[in-house]
Image (cartoon, rainbow, N blue to C red):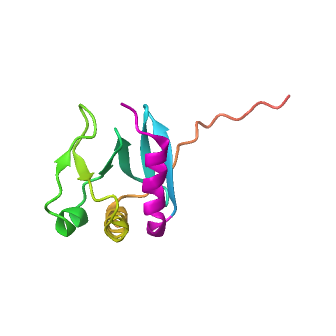
Amino acid sequence: MASKPEFVQYIADQLEEAGVITYRKMFGEYGMYCDGKIFALICNDQLFIKITEAGKQQRPDLEMVPPYEGAKPYFLIEEIENRDFLVEFVTATCKELPLPKKKKSTGKKKSET
């Protein structure tokens, strides 16, 4: 079951104080980004946030499960109505995540015609 765009937008709205929140459809579900860093997936209308040491320290009680079969575990976030928690958790998580790698240039130039 694919996630509803309304659910994804709700999560983005909840997180607006964490940074520049964007999302992108990926394989029928959604990847969420904060200031250019992918930090979460939304699958089947559930929010899964990458596991970091900050996240483990902040909320050791959170369930860690894969968002889809064959995936690495993520934190399953069920407190989506708690905006303060979400913003604090995502901010701490994103501080630990690396910046996205720059795409390598192929070295090919467009031919001039």
Task: Count the labels in the image.
Answer: 0
Q: Say whether residue 13 is magenta.
A: yes
Whether 60 is among the magenta residues is no
Q: Is residue 39 left or right of residue 56?
A: right
Q: Check the image and report above or below for 37 versus 30.
A: below
**Camera-side residue: 36 or 85?**
85
Q: Is 42 left or right of 109, judged from the image as shown?
A: left
Q: Quadrant of the C terminus?
A: top right
Q: Position of residue 108 (x, y in %)?
A: 65, 34
The quarter of the picture where residue 14 lies is bottom left
Q: Nearer the viewer, residue 18 or 77?
A: 77
Residues 113 and 23: in front is 23
Q: Is residue 20 left or right of residue 73?
A: right
Which residue appears farthest toward the right when viewing the image?
113
Q: From the image, which quarter does the N terminus lie in?
A: top left
Q: Whole-percent x and y of residue 4? A: 44, 40
Across and down, in percent, residue 63 comes to 17, 52
User: At x 42% / y 45%, what residue is drawn?
Assistant: 31
Q: Which residues are magenta?
A: 1-19
Q: Quadrant of residue 56?
A: bottom left
- By secondary structure, the bulk of the magenta-drawn segment is best described as helix
Q: At 37% across and 67% down in the image, what residue appears?
A: 83
